[in-house]
């Protein structure tokens, strides 16, 4: 709070309104006199997000995408106090998807910062464009490889007597872990789920997409790779539809039934397992939808 505001509070209510205004304007906020370049410089070099609250103009400048990006690169990556720009008290910055995409391009640690990590923020704020890009972003990882022995991975690159493979940024997990961990089984997250379901189909050209020279390819005739070849991309749709029923998510339940083209017998089996193992409320729309599919399928005599 500025001194001018403090002074205006001390003016008795009986004073004329113009007197209050005059006293308030005696000591204007000095930051508002500076141009945007100066304010941006002050904010970035302060290394303190709280500086943005000192004036309206400084607040506006500090929340520009270009300013936020520079501030993050300069200050927050090296700070243990502000793990990253998604510090909980600065969620207006965190909601900017353009900034997230810039940070992914700059190589941000997507899991650094605990619950305020980049990957958590992407899912929390439903940043579908950032997620699309993240799922296709890769890293080059050095591996041990001995040609005459059996090896867990075949290299993509051989350069300067070293072996490397191309990996996705989220290689140490599985697709069902992502779906359950970020509750992508909920109807409101269906767009993000569809994004994630594409993981197993993402292919990269080692030369065109990864910038590897043909001379450095481990196998000269192997230019294209599946990015998620070394992680579990198996989607357990039976388990997923049980989850959508239990959480009463009719839209996603309907999508899975039509996508998998479940026959009546399989739907009946899934419905029975859910009903026998759990208490299903009478107003559960997802469960009612499954029963409707079973009834219609039985009437038609053909699977969906």
Image (cartoon, rainbow, N blue to C red):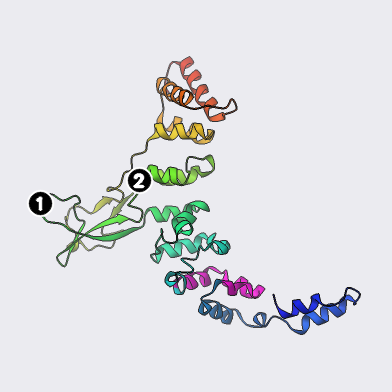
Label of residue 15 in the image: none
Q: Residue at x 69, y 80 (%)?
A: 29
* Secondary structure at numbered mark 1: loop
Residue 194 seen by the camera: no
In-front residue for pair 79/143: 79
Query: Is the N terminus in the top left, top right, bottom left or bottom right quadrant?
Result: bottom right
Dot 2 surroundings within 10 Å: few (below 14), some, or many (20 or more)?
A: some
Q: Is residue 4 left or right of residue 35?
A: right
Percent position (x, y) of residue 58?
A: 62, 75
Label of residue 149 in the image: 1
Q: Main secondary structure of the magenta part?
A: helix
Dot 1 surroundings within 10 Å: few (below 14), some, or many (20 or more)?
A: few
Considering only order in the chain, which callout, 2 or 1, is on the residue closer to the N terminus? 1
Percent position (x, y) of residue 62?
A: 57, 72
Q: Is residue 274 above or below residue 20?
A: above
Q: Is residue 287 magenta?
A: no
Residue 8 seen by the camera: yes
- The residue singled out by tag 2 in the image is 174
* Secondary structure at numbered mark 2: loop
In-front residue for pair 116/69: 116
Percent position (x, y) of residue 188?
A: 54, 43
In-front residue for pair 254/18: 18
């Amino acid at each position: 709070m500025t001194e001018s505001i403090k002074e205006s509070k001390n003016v008795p209510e009986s004073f004329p309104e113009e007197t209050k205004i005059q006293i308030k304007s005696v000591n204007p906020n000095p930051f508002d006199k500076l141009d945007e370049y100066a304010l941006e410089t002050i904010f970035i070099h302060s290394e303190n997000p709280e500086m943005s609250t000192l004036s309206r103009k400084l607040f506006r400048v500090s929340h520009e995408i270009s300013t936020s990006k520079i501030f993050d690169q300069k200050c927050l990556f090296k700070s243990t106090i502000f793990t990253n720009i998604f510090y909980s008290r600065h969620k207006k910055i965190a909601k900017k998807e353009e900034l997230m995409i810039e940070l992914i391009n700059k190589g941000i640690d997507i899991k650094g910062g605990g619950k305020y990590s980049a990957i958590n923020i992407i899912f929390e704020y439903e940043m579908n464009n950032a997620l699309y890009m993240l799922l296709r972003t890769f890293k080059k990882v050095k591996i041990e490889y001995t040609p005459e022995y059996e090896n867990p991975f075949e290299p993509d690159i051989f350069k300067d007597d070293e072996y490397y493979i191309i990996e996705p940024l989220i290689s140490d997990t599985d697709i069902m872990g992502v779906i359950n961990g970020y509750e992508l089984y909920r109807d409101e997250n269906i767009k993000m789920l569809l994004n994630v379901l594409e993981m197993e189909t993402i292919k990269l050209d080692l030369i065109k997409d990864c910038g590897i020279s043909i001379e450095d390819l481990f196998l000269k005739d192997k230019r294209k790779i599946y990015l998620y070849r070394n992680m579990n991309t198996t989607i357990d749709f039976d388990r997923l539809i049980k989850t959508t029923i239990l959480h009463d998510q009719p839209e996603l339940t309907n999508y899975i039934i039509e996508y998998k083209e479940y026959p009546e017998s399989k739907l009946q089996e899934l419905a029975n397992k859910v009903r026998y193992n759990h208490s299903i409320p009478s107003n559960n729309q997802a469960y009612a939808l499954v029963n409707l599919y079973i009834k219609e399928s039985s009437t038609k005599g053909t699977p969906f």
